[in-house]
Amino acid sequence: MSKIIATRAIRGAHKIVERAEKELAKAVEAKGKDFAVSFPDTNYYLPLALAMLGIKASRIGDLIEIMDYARQLLPPIPSENIWLPYLGPTLDAGMATLFAEEVIEVLKYAFGPCPTYDYWVGFTTDAILREQGIKLVDGRMPGFAAIVGAAPTNKDAVRIVRELQERQILIFLSATTNGKCIAEQLAEENVQMGWDSFLVPHGKDISTTVYALNFAARAAMTFGGITPKGLKEARDILLYNKNRVHAFVLALGDVDDEKHANAAGAINFGFPAIADTDIDQILPTGVCKYEHVVSPVSLDKIVEKAIEVRGLKLSIEKIDIPVSYGSAFEGERIRKEQTGAEIGGKFSKAFEFLRMKTLEEVENGKIQVIGRELDEFEDGAAVPFAMIIDVAGRKMQKDFESVLERRIHNFLSEALGIMHTGQRHVIWARVSKDARKSGLRFKHFGTILFSRFLHDFPSIVDKVQVTIYTKNEDVVKLLPEALKAFSERDARLADMTDESVDVFYSCKLCQSYAPNHVCIISPERLGLCGAYNWLDGKAASEINPTGGNEPVLKGACIDAKVGEWQGINDYLYNKSNKAFERLGLYSLMDAPSTSCGCFECIVGLIPEANGVMIVNRGFSGMTPCGMKFSTLAGMVGGGQQVPGFVGIGMLYITSPKFISANGGFQRIVWMTKELKDSLSAQLKKHAEEAGNPDFIDKIADETVATTAEELLPFLQKVNHPALSMPPMM
């Protein structure tokens, strides 16, 4: 253990703890010990204090208790001449630093200045944490990087984050070098930041570095299902992060005492630090998987070195296009003034159509652009566009056409400079001026799809051919064939019911984070993340028979109303580590589905109304059951089976099997306005079929009621059917 690292980390911890104590003393004097403090929209109080100490801090007085622990952890600042052969005191100093920084940051929310302004995001809400869950479990996000400080130049800053983005690594940005944060360098270069682009600027203050660590602590509590109670659980949370949350720190520029202290805090979680400046190294393995601190590493090699030291195994397929490519660019937004060309929307006719052909009909790798290329259109032009993808494979099936076609959106969106929304004949896309200037052309759309379909679906796709048309007359001529195919697919899927098949499909992708969770997907109930339906499960099992999606024989029917089959129960028992014996697929009350944490919505019982409410992710308000989404998610998630509450995919609400064992969609007494508006057409159709055409107007939302007491009078006034239905309990 280096004497310099120990001295600087412990000295930095003392500085940060003393700062927190002073700011806390001012808060006590101004507001008293009973004044409420909290981070926004979280069920985890101060997450690190909860995870490590079990303290549910909600008042200033609770912060005093946290700071008492931090002070007790602080070792004395060692003499410059003393060499420490072990990490213990340094790790204690690091943890004290994190406790103190959480206190500093939560006081900003209570007294200001608020850390959320301009592009700075401050604290990560539970809703956002859970939104990242699907990226964690499906491999789109293999790890995290916390960049502390700033690069020598803006060009270096952009290159480093692009290298990380191309590898799908989430990037937290905080602290400064010579007064500047790397986030400011990126802003100066017009690099889009935010959760959608995997670039999360927390703040310039060194204390904002704690947000990356309390994100990691909540990942263990949320997806690992670890409930903090004492030292054992605290250790489990740290080990969970070491083994499953593949994070590291990139320390850019001068590493001062406070940055040393934060690096020591990160090492507690098994997260190593890699620096571009010459600081003392800690090379023996132990708390981290490999080395703890590595320096100096040149900027052109720092990303690769960090990946190596953390032990990340990444397989990156380079696609031959002139722009960066990776899922970190999937959420990119291109404003009108940045647009080089516009496709579809209200501006031009456009569609995308994938069709199955025989092996003889497809010339593998053939990409044609019939009409003008991207660089032949004037700046910002509305481009007529038809893209036909012909695929062939010995195991390809007609039912897989729609599964593959839905991936066009993801594949194109991952190119830097392409913004893509929608599918089929309802698409809207923009290509940025910068991408066009870099050499991006329509032919590269074909290159992307050719590469990704063969790479992602090798078991069912043997050949891919892409033809792109940019003449309006060609688009108009070809559209009827596509529309006819779309209608035939919809009719085929509409006729598919749970009763018409003998096999359902499982999804165990989330088990790396919720070990006992098993999702069962049927034709009439999609996965709770909303990303996988029955056909997706079927295709995935064909592609990778040993992967996360497996066919499950229904077996003998035990209870058709509840949706219980012997084969499903047997599978659930074996695959949930024998934690659960039964599944009532259509019931909210009797053995409902387990929930991992990636659900789009939560259905919850409201006993007073004899009905249910539905709240979607991202809604931060109060609900009539007395809990916000974040609190409900903490109760339901982690692979638990909670009668009366369940996580679902949004489109399940429109299924005839939606909690059909409990009365179905007419049990809905409250849902968020956003949900009600987005599903109004489908809900109206259900209501008309049930003989209650004005039912949607009888569903309350947050504009009508946020408590059960406010809800009941409204339901009585509109004569909601749930009030006269049999009791749910």
Image: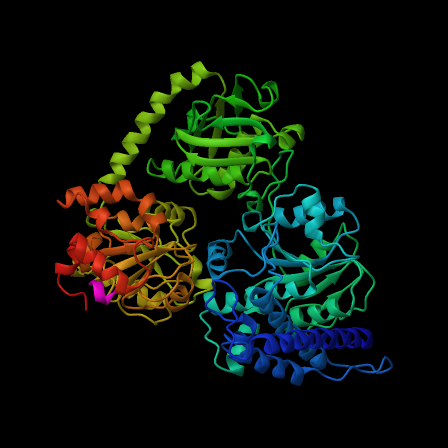
Q: How many marks?
A: 0
Residue at 51% x, 67% y: name it.
Answer: 218
Which residue is at the far top?
473
* Residue 625 vertical position relative to residue 29 in the rendered view, above or below: above
Residue 382 % position (x, y): 51, 22
Quadrant into which the C terminus falls: bottom left
Main secondary structure found in the magenta portion: helix
Magenta run includes residue 514: no
Q: Is residue 374 left or right of residue 410?
A: right
* Residue 703 vertical position relative to residue 558 in the rendered view, above or below: above
Q: How is the image coloured?
A: rainbow
Nearest to the observer: residue 454 or residue 640: 640
Q: Is residue 104 left or right of residue 82?
A: left
Nearest to the observer: residue 186 or residue 60: 60
Region in magenta: 606-610
Q: Is residue 433 left or right of residue 554?
A: right
Residue 607 % position (x, y): 23, 67
Which residue is at the far front?
30
Nearest to the observer: residue 11 or residue 304: 11
Which residue is at the far right?
81
Asked where in the image residue 110 lies, by quadrant, the reply is bottom right
Magenta run includes residue 608: yes
Residue 66 % position (x, y): 58, 79
Question: In this orientation, does residue 560 appear?
Answer: no
